Image (cartoon, rainbow, N blue to C red):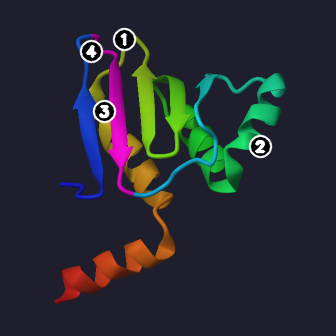
């Protein structure tokens, strides 16, 4: 189980919100759809490098249709014909990849003890 990301489900079963305990964006709130459109580049810049990479990686996942990002929150909407059982492990892995290096190293050290 991921201890750095709390997962919130919604009445709309196509949407999940992920609450990491680390910052994922510099922007207040931005929304992106698959595929990332050329006009989205200016909005991606507002997220900072890590946030922009995270959004691009999430939208590249098969089945992810939309991502809304805030400093400590990501809302992911999947396509209607896709299952969270297939998508969610990849979403969590992608979010973990954006975890600050120091936090990741502390987790690795704790798991080795």
For marks 2 and 4 on the same chain, the one whose residue lies earlier in the sequence: 4
Residue 35, by quadrant, is top right
- Name the residue: 70% across, 54% down: 49
| Disc marking residue 13 | 4
Q: What element carries label 4?
A: loop
For marks 4 and 1 on the same chain, the one whose residue lies earlier in the sequence: 4
Residue 96, by quadrant, is bottom left
Q: Is residue 14 above or below residue 86?
A: above
Q: What element carries label 2?
A: helix
Q: What element carries label 3?
A: helix
Front residue of 46/59: it is 46
| Disc marking residue 86 | 3
- Name the residue: 23% across, 58% down: 3
- 59 in the magenta segment: no
Q: Which of marks 3 and 2 is in front?
A: 2
Measure the C-alpha gap from mark 4 to mark 1: 12 Å
Q: Nearer the viewer, mark 4 or mark 1?
A: 4
| Disc marking residue 45 | 2
Q: Residues within 10 Å of mark 1 (few under 14, many from 20)?
A: few
Residue 2, by quadrant, is bottom left
Measure the C-alpha gap from mark 4 to mark 3: 14 Å
- Name the residue: 38% across, 10% down: 80
Q: Position of residue 53 (x, y in %)?
A: 64, 49
For marks 3 and 1 on the same chain, the one whose residue lies earlier in the sequence: 1
Q: Where is residue 43 in the image (x, y as percent from the top left)?
A: 75, 33
- State the extent of the magenta-drawn residues as a range: 12-21
Task: Determine which residue is flagged by label 1.
Answer: 81
Q: How crowded is mark 3: few (under 14 residues within 10 Å), some or many (20 or more)?
A: few
Q: Is 75 left, or right, of 67 in this rendering?
A: left
Q: Where is residue 14 in the image (x, y as percent from the top left)?
A: 34, 16
For marks 2 and 1 on the same chain, the one whose residue lies earlier in the sequence: 2
**Total numbered labels:** 4
């Amino acid at each position: 189980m991921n201890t750095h990301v709390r997962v919130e489900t919604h009445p709309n079963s196509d949407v999940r919100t992920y609450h990491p305990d680390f910052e994922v964006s510099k922007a207040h709130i931005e929304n992106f759809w698959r595929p990332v459109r050329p006009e989205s580049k200016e909005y991606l810049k507002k997220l900072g490098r890590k946030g922009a990479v995270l959004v691009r990686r999430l939208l590249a996942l098969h089945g992810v249709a939309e991502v809304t990002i805030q400093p400590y929150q990501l809302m992911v909407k999947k396509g209607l014909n896709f299952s969270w059982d297939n998508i969610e492990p990849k979403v969590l892995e992608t979010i973990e990849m954006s975890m600050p290096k120091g936090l990741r190293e502390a987790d690795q050290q704790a798991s080795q003890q």
